[in-house]
Image (cartoon, rainbow, N blue to C red):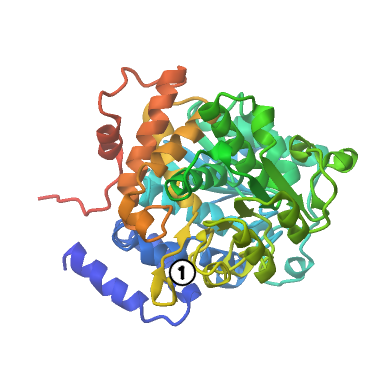
Amino acid sequence: MSQELQAKRLMHLIRQYNTPLQKYMALMDLEERNERLFYKLMIDHVEELLPIVYTPTVGEACQKYGTIFRRPQGLYISLKEKGKVHDVLRNWPEKNIKVIVVTDGERILGLGDLGCQGMGIPVGKLALYTALGGIRPSECLPITIDVGTNNEMLLNDEFYIGMRQKRATGQEYDDLLDEFMYAAKQAFGEKVLIQFEDFANHNAFKLLEKYRSTHLVFNDDIQGTASVVLAGLVASLKLTGGTLADHTFLFLGAGEAGTGIAELIALEITKQGKISLNEARKRIWLVDSKGLIVKSRMESLQHFKKSWAHEHEPCKGLLDAVKSIRPTILIGSSGAGRTFTKEVIETVSSFNEKPVILALSNPTSQSECTAEEAYTWSKGRAIFASGSPFDPVSIDGKTFIPGQSNNAYIFPGLGLGLVISGTIRVHEDMLLAASEALAQQVTKQHLDQGLIYPPFRNIRKISAHIAAGVAAKSYELGLATYLPRPADLVAFAESCMYSPIYRNYK
């Protein structure tokens, strides 16, 4: 039976399952059994299978990971391995590792502390590195650092697969992560990309800041989210007109994602408008659980929020902030579902002809609003995108296709660009280059449908262009080590991509 016919038969079988979780389990079994066929399905049916392998279904899979667990899919490093982390890494059967995705499971999507059950996230992310970005499966390593969990439900769950203790913190935690970071570089080399995934805010910023100058590191929650959102905003300018500097931004959520997006927007405004970073930041406002972030709150703010405290009267909630700030772009990264209420969206729409509304929180249940709510309450005028997928919406005979501001647009292409150029450090300009490359893939036809992101069915082509942009910036900054630079970086990126087609041994 040909691979094409095998793929057709398996898709027919997968579509017979009643729930997304059943489809997820069937696909994970297929990946274990026939890796090439799994990636053939992922590449050929990316729009259908992406929500199964990645968000939103992966969130449910992580919640139920102990129940559905069949065999280990990645590497677990616990406190018990302290002092032996390098030996544990060297026990992994593949030696030519190019990309590691690592989590400690403390903040899985918008679902909180899932401990070791967060392994579904590194596994899913690396499946997309291969399917969407062309990194070879043998060069990918999913890792979960097990330092315990504070989730009482999991600690009392007989099927929980991790250490049954409260989370380690402080020096004990820092020492294990430090040992891991240097063991990874020792085991796999200077150019191994380590992607931090779903760490809680207090550790995410600290780890990125600590290792960005000594390792090739990237935090998808902070930097990947920022890059994909910036791409959507740049594309939306073709519908709203003007430049980023002409807009006023209001965020609901001031954690990893919110502050990361805000900073990258400010950097892009600075680059485009030749104004200072501080001036650019003044166009961007953030609301957290205590209200609008303003100067009068400076003493009590966490360090990563202080750059966003501007002079203004306090506002208790989002609606008050919307009325006072009058944003043209409203961005949700709060992890709190249904917080973009009817009154909030109607108010934003009352002073904007085309309000940009991005409801980014995952999974779908945590989205700040649905596509139908955004389009209905704005009377069809909103430019909308979300973190999780929504179906098209019809209003008064017109169909709107909501875009998905999905990190999967960025991190596979970014990783490919870093790998093919032999880059040794991630620079913020590479994230801007990735955003610009993605925005350039949005055509007039997409914009006419209300889309500010291109369809996922072209994702490998998109990833090649992003990889080329990232690699070009790396060569420009002197951070690339593979010389000479290829003349055609897009073609080179495409030539480096893994193919799942069966080998012919005749």
Residue 189: image location, x then y, percent = 49, 27
The correct choice, above or below, for 62 with respect to 298 in the image is below
The correct choice, above or below, for 298 with respect to 158 in the image is above
The number of callouts visible is 1
The correct choice, above or below, for 441 with respect to 345 in the image is above
Q: Is residue 216 visible?
A: no
Disc 1 marks which residue?
Answer: 24
Residue 443: image location, x then y, percent = 32, 49
Secondary element under disc 1, as helix, strand or loop, is helix
Relative to the observer, which residue lies in front, 81 or 115? 115
Residue 14: image location, x then y, percent = 36, 75
Question: In which image quadrant can residue 320 be found?
Answer: bottom right
Residue type, numbered disc 1: Tyr
Residue plotted at (53% across, 31% down): 187
Question: In which image quadrant can residue 450 be found?
Answer: bottom left
Give the residue furthest to the left: 506
Relative to the observer, which residue lies in front, 171 or 93? 171
Relative to the observer, which residue lies in front, 313 or 353? 353
The correct choice, above or below, for 283 with respect to 114 in the image is above
Q: Is residue 473 visible?
A: yes
Q: Is residue 380 left or right of residue 206?
A: left
Residue plotted at (47% across, 45% down): 241
Q: Quadrant of the N terminus?
A: bottom left
Residue plotted at (37% across, 63% down): 47
Crowding at mark 1 (Cα within 10 Å: few <14, some 14-19, many 20+): many
Q: Is residue 271 left or right of residue 312?
A: left
Question: In which image quadrant can residue 337 be found?
Answer: bottom right
Q: Is residue 315 left or right of residue 122?
A: right
Residue 12: image location, x then y, percent = 29, 77
Relative to the observer, which residue lies in front, 284 or 35? 284
